[in-house]
């Protein structure tokens, strides 16, 4: 909405924000569980990435079914 007619920037900015926030949530999780910060941050990022990939794949499959 704020980036005008640049669709790539409209996808890259939220992706960067999402990656940053997921990494921060993982780091906070490690602080609460007294674990290793980097391991927990990457674990959170990978799990969310797999979930996003599955959701994207299901969306593509659903789109192909209704066309």
Image (spheres, grey):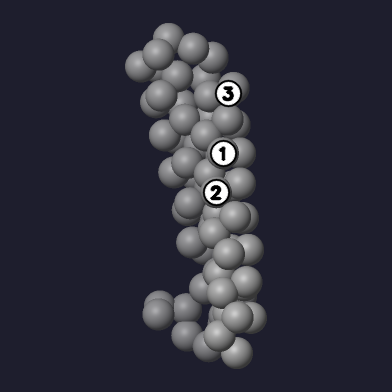
Provide the residue designation for mark 3. Answer: 38
Among all residues in the image, which is located at the extreme front? 65
Q: Position of residue 62 (x, y in %)?
A: 56, 74
Q: Image quarter for residue 11? A: bottom right
Residue under the image location 60 percent in, 90 percent down: 67
Nearer to us in this view, 13 or 65: 65
Nearer to us in this view, 16 or 51: 51
Between disc 3 and disc 1, the foreground one is 1
**Does 46 sit above or below residue 66?**
above
Q: Is residue 26 left or right of residue 60?
A: left
Q: Is residue 2 visible?
A: yes
Helix, strand or loop at mark 2: helix
What's the distance in space between the residues labelled 3 and 1, CA to CA? Answer: 14 Å
Between discs 3 and 1, the one toward the N terminus: 3
Q: Position of residue 35 (x, y in %)?
A: 49, 12
Circles 2 and 1 in contact, beta carbons < 8 Å? yes
Circles 3 and 1 in contact, beta carbons < 8 Å? no
Helix, strand or loop at mark 3: helix
């Amino acid at each position: 909405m704020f980036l005008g007619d640049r669709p790539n920037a409209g996808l890259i900015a939220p992706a960067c924000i999402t990656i940053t926030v997921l990494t921060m949530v993982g780091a906070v999780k490690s602080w609460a569980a007294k674990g290793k910060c980097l391991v927990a941050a990457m674990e959170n990022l990978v799990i969310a990435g797999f979930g996003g990939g599955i959701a994207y794949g299901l969306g593509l499959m659903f789109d192909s079914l209704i066309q």
